[in-house]
Image (cartoon, rainbow, N blue to C red):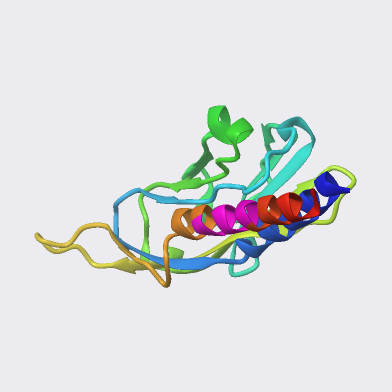
Amino acid sequence: MKFLFLFVLSGLFVNAAAGESETIHVSVGEDVILPCNLTRLFDMSTVRVEWTHNGNDVHVNRKGEDLKVQDENFRDRTSLFREEMRSGNVSLKLTKVTKRDEGKYNCNVRPENTEQFTACSITLEAVLRSEDSGRHVKDTGSSTGAIVGVSFSIVVGIGLRIILLIN
């Protein structure tokens, strides 16, 4: 019973971080990484990862294989970090950013026999180059790592206190 309670609490905690979004600024012509780390680990040989831009396919990976299905504007300019996908890194690398690349990107994940969920939502803003401009990330809230760490500590602390009270 004690472990069931902690399991339920941890499930609530994992889902709380989903849907978080941020805005990334990048100079036109530069490469950019749209960060996305899953809060749960999956067997990536059974998962479909789909990055979209304003509803169009940017990059699709199914069961570890990159599919050719993608918007023509992104052809030969996207990649995933395949060697890091096992550890939950489903970030997208986009090369040679153009003004046309601006907009909202979603990373949708669908584990086998499970419903699809949006793991990350990122807005990309492409700025014209100037000598002193570079890549800028505008945080739209607290960092994900801090939120996850504090939330996990609180959940574990509450769970342990309840277990101690029951005993």
Identity of the residue drawn at 60% across and 40% down? 88
Q: Nearer the viewer, residue 82 or 7?
A: 7
Q: Is residue 123 visible?
A: no
Magenta residue check for 156: yes
Is 154 on the left-hand or right-hand side of 140?
right
Q: Position of residue 109 (x, y in %)?
A: 71, 51
Looking at the image, the residue that sits furthest to the left is 131
Give the residue at x 46% y 53%. Answer: 145
Q: Nearer the viewer, residue 67 or 73?
A: 67
Which sits in the foreground, 18 or 31?
18
* Majority SS type along the magenta span: helix
Q: Position of residue 103 (x, y in %)?
A: 48, 71
The region drawn magenta spans: 150-157
All told, the count of numbered labels is 0
Examine the image and state in which quarter residue 154 appears: bottom right
Q: Is residue 159 visible?
A: yes
Picture layout, residue 87 above or below residue 127: above
Give the side of residue 99 with respect to residue 110, left or right. Answer: left
Residue 65: image x %, image y %? 69, 32
Location of residue 47 with respect to 29 vertically, above or below = above
Residue at position x 57%, y 44% from top?
90
List x then y, in percent, for residue 72. 57, 54
The residue sitting at the top extreme is: 83
Against 89, residue 161 (above or below) is below
Q: Is residue 20 magenta?
A: no
